[in-house]
C-alpha cells in the first residue's frame, strides 16, 4: 500500500507542517525525559525523510511518543473528573442485578443519578472484574485514538492525515485528559472504530465490515449522548447516497438500532422514568456551576452579566437547534467529510453555549474537526 503523494512539493509541505506542529506541541508538553528525547530525535527524522522519502518513520514517531506520553501522564495524574468513579460505583449496582437508573450515588455535590448510557457499564466491566483501575484502562484506549486516525488516512491512501495525527498524538491537554477520569476518549474511540469499518466497507465492498460498522455505531450510540450529533447528519447522508455501501442503507440502520435495543433496551424500558430523570439532570438540574470555555463565563467575567440556569439552557437549546436545522436544510451532505463538518459545528455550538464546558469535551470534538478535512470520495 502506497501512502505517499507523488508531488514532491506536497510531500515536503506535509512533512514540514507535521514536524512544525510536533515541535510546538512537544515543547508545550514540558521537560519530562520522554519529550526531551522526542525533541532531540527531530533532526534524525529530517535526515531520514530526505534520505528515504518515507513518511513511516514520522508516523511511528508520532504514534509512539503519543502512546508513551499518555502512559507517563497516568502516573502523574489523578481523578480530576468524577465520571469514571461514578461509573465504577454503578457497575457495582449492575453486577448485583440492580437497574442503575433506579439508583443514586453520592458525588462531589450531592446525590446524583446515573447520567450515562448503558454501554458504558459493559465497556468498563472487564476492568472492574479484573480490578484494573478504570483510569488506566481509559489511558490505554486513548493511546489507540491516534492510531485509528492513521488507519483512516491509510484507507484513503493519503498523507494529508499527518498534521492531524500530530495534533491528536501530542496536544498537551489531550495527553492530560487520557488519564484524568473522564470517558471521552472511549467515546470517540468507539465512534471512530465504526467510522473506520464504514470506510473500509466502502473501499473493499465488504459486507461484514458494513455490518460491524453498524453494530459498533449502535454501541457508540449507547455509550455517549454526543453521538447524537453525528447521527443527526450521518443518517441523512446514508439516504442521500443509497448505493454507497455493499449492504442496503435500511439493513445498516437495522443492525445499528438492533445493537442499541440489545444494549440499552433492558435498562430503559424497565425504568423509563429513571432514564428521563437522567436526561433531565444532564440538561437542566445538574449541580455544575458556570465554568469553562463558553460564552457565559466570558460574559460574566468581562461584563458581569449573570444568567439563570434556565436562561442559559434555553439559549443553548435554541442556538443548537437552529444550527442543526440550518445545516440540514442548506448544507448538502454529498460527501462523508461534510457529516463531520456538520456534526462538529453543531456540537461546537452546543458546547459554546453550555454553562459547563471542560477540556474533556474537546477530546470528542477535536477528531470530528480533523476528519472534516478529508474526503473518502477522492
Image: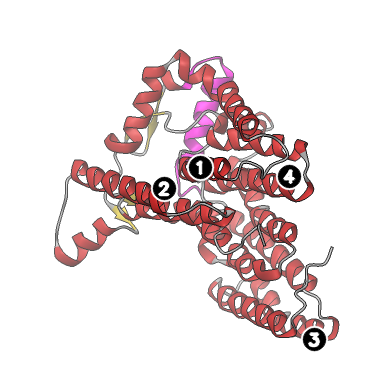
Q: Earlier in the sequence, mark 3 or mark 4?
A: 3
Q: Earlier in the sequence, mark 1 or mark 4?
A: 4
Foreground pick, 122 / 279: 279
Secondary structure beneath disc 3? helix
Q: Along the horizontal axis of the image, is 363 left or right of 284? A: right
Residue 355 spot, x, y in % from top left? 29, 49
Residue picked out by circle 1: 236
Q: Along the horizontal axis of the image, is 91 left or right of 318? A: right
Q: Does 85 appear in magenta?
A: yes
Q: Contact, CB < 8 Å: mark 1 with mark 3?
A: no
Q: Does 374 appear in magenta?
A: no
Q: CA distance from mark 3 to mark 4?
A: 35 Å
- Name the image quarter holding residue 53: bottom right
Q: Along the horizontal axis of the image, is 3 left or right of 327? A: right
Q: Earlier in the sequence, mark 2 or mark 3?
A: 3
Q: Contact, CB < 8 Å: mark 1 with mark 4?
A: no
Foreground pick, 90 / 11: 11
Q: Nearer the viewer, mark 1 or mark 3?
A: 1
Q: Contact, CB < 8 Å: mark 2 with mark 1?
A: yes
Residue 360 visible in the picture: no
Q: Nearer the viewer, mark 3 or mark 4?
A: 4
Amino acid at each position: 500500500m502506497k501512502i505517499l503523494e507523488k508531488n514532491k512539493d506536497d510531500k515536503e509541505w506535509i512533512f514540514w507542517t507535521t514536524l512544525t506542529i510536533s515541535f510546538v506541541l512537544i515543547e508545550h508538553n514540558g521537560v519530562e525525559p520522554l519529550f526531551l528525547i522526542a525533541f532531540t530525535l527531530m533532526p534524525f527524522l529530517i535526515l531520514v525523510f530526505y534520505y528515504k522519502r518515507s513518511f513511516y518513520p514520522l508516523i511511528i514517531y508520532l504514534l509512539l511518543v503519543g502512546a508513551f506520553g499518555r502512559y507517563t501522564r497516568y502516573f502523574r495524574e489523578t481523578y480530576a473528573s468524577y465520571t469514571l468513579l461514578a461509573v465504577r460505583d454503578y457497575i457495582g449496582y449492575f453486577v448485583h442485578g440492580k437497574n442503575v437508573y433506579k439508583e443514586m450515588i453520592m458525588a462531589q455535590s450531592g446525590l446524583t443519578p446515573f447520567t450515562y448510557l448503558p454501554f458504558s457499564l459493559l465497556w468498563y466491566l472487564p476492568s472492574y472484574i479484573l480490578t484494573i483501575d478504570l483510569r488506566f484502562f481509559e489511558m490505554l484506549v486513548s493511546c489507540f485514538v491516534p492510531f485509528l486516525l492513521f488507519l483512516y488516512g491509510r484507507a484513503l491512501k493519503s498523507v494529508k492525515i499527518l498534521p492531524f495525527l500530530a495534533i491528536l498524538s501530542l496536544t498537551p491537554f489531550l495527553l492530560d485528559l487520557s488519564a484524568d477520569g473522564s470517558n471521552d476518549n472511549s467515546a470517540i474511540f468507539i465512534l471512530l472504530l465504526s467510522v473506520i469499518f464504514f470506510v473500509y466497507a466502502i473501499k473493499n465492498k465488504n459486507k461484514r465490515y458494513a455490518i460491524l460498522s453498524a453494530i459498533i455505531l449502535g454501541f457508540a450510540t449507547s455509550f455517549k449522548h454526543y453521538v447524537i450529533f453525528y447521527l443527526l447528519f450521518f443518517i441523512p447522508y446514508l439516504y442521500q447516497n443509497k448505493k454507497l455501501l455493499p449492504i442496503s442503507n435500511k439493513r445498516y440502520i437495522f443492525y445499528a438500532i438492533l445493537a442499541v435495543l440489545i444494549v440499552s433496551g433492558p435498562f430503559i424500558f424497565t425504568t423509563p422514568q429513571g432514564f428521563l430523570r437522567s436526561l433531565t439532570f444532564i440538561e437542566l438540574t445538574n449541580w455544575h456551576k458556570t465554568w469553562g470555555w463558553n460564552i457565559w463565563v466570558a460574559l460574566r467575567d468581562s461584563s458581569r452579566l449573570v444568567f439563570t440556569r434556565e436562561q442559559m439552557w434555553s439559549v443553548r437549546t435554541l442556538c443548537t437547534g437552529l444550527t442543526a436545522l440550518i445545516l440540514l436544510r442548506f448544507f448538502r451532505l454529498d460527501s462523508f467529510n461534510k457529516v463531520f463538518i456538520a456534526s462538529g459545528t453543531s456540537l461546537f455550538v452546543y458546547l459554546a453555549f453550555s454553562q459547563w464546558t471542560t477540556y474533556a469535551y474537546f477530546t470528542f470534538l477535536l477528531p470530528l474537526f480533523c476528519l472534516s478535512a478529508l474526503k473518502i470520495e477522492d
